[in-house]
Image (cartoon, helix red, strand yellow):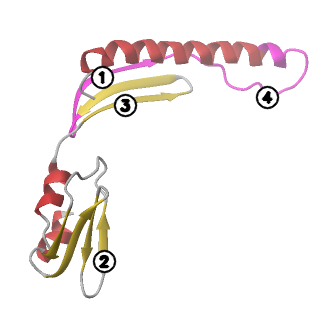
Amino acid sequence: MHKRLGPLEGEPGRAVYADGAARIELATETITVRPPFGLAHARVYDEVELGPLFEALDEDHLVAALLVRLGGYAVGVLEGERLVASKVGTRFVKGKHKKGGSSSNRFRRRRDEQARALIEAAAETAARVLKPWRDRV
């Protein structure tokens, strides 16, 4: 973003900071940037002013993530681009039964039980890993 917008700093045009986004209005184009965690700055500049936008983009945020897929899960806390806490786990979940017949319902029930156990294990792990970070993420 710095590489693309940096040369525009101070150019004729307008920079409008409003509603969590920055709109750079040039004679040839308009560029709107909405930082992922919002933009608190609100002001209109009569030339291209990028300082508040770059500050918001460079800010590190603390983010918690929980990823769950059939057979596994991962919990993590990221501070900026650095992983500061994580835990991964697996649980067996039987694949779908290809054939029909009287046993297919038994396989479906077993699979549902295994999937439920996976979700419970992921939730317990998430609660344990994220507890120290609860007030900051």
Mark 2 lies on a secondary structure that is strand
Mark 3 vs mark 2: which is more N-terminal? 2
68, above or below 118, in the image: below
Name the residue nearer the viewer: 46 or 80.
46
Q: Is residue 10 left or right of residue 29?
A: left
Name the residue nearer the viewer: 20 or 35.
20
119, above or below 33, in the image: above
Tell me the CA gap for discs 3 and 1: 9 Å
Q: Which residue is mark 4?
A: 98
- Report the mark closest to the observer, 1 or 2: 2
Looking at the picture, how far across and down is residue 131, in whole percent? 30, 15
x 10%, y 62%: residue: 51
Please give the label number shown on residue 63: none
- Report the mark closest to the observer, 3 or 2: 2
Can you name the residue that lies furthest to the front here?
Answer: 43
Mark 1 vs mark 2: which is more N-terminal? 2
Name the residue nearer the viewer: 118 or 7.
7
Mark 4 lies on a secondary structure that is loop
Tell me the CA gap for discs 1 and 4: 36 Å
Q: Which residue is mark 2?
A: 30
Q: Is residue 80 left or right of residue 31?
A: left
Which residues make up the magenta segment? Answer: 79-106
Please give the label number shown on residue 86: 1
Mark 4 vs mark 3: which is more N-terminal? 3
Looking at the rendered structure, the kind of residue marked 4 is Lys
Q: Where on the picture, by quarter, is residue 126?
A: top left
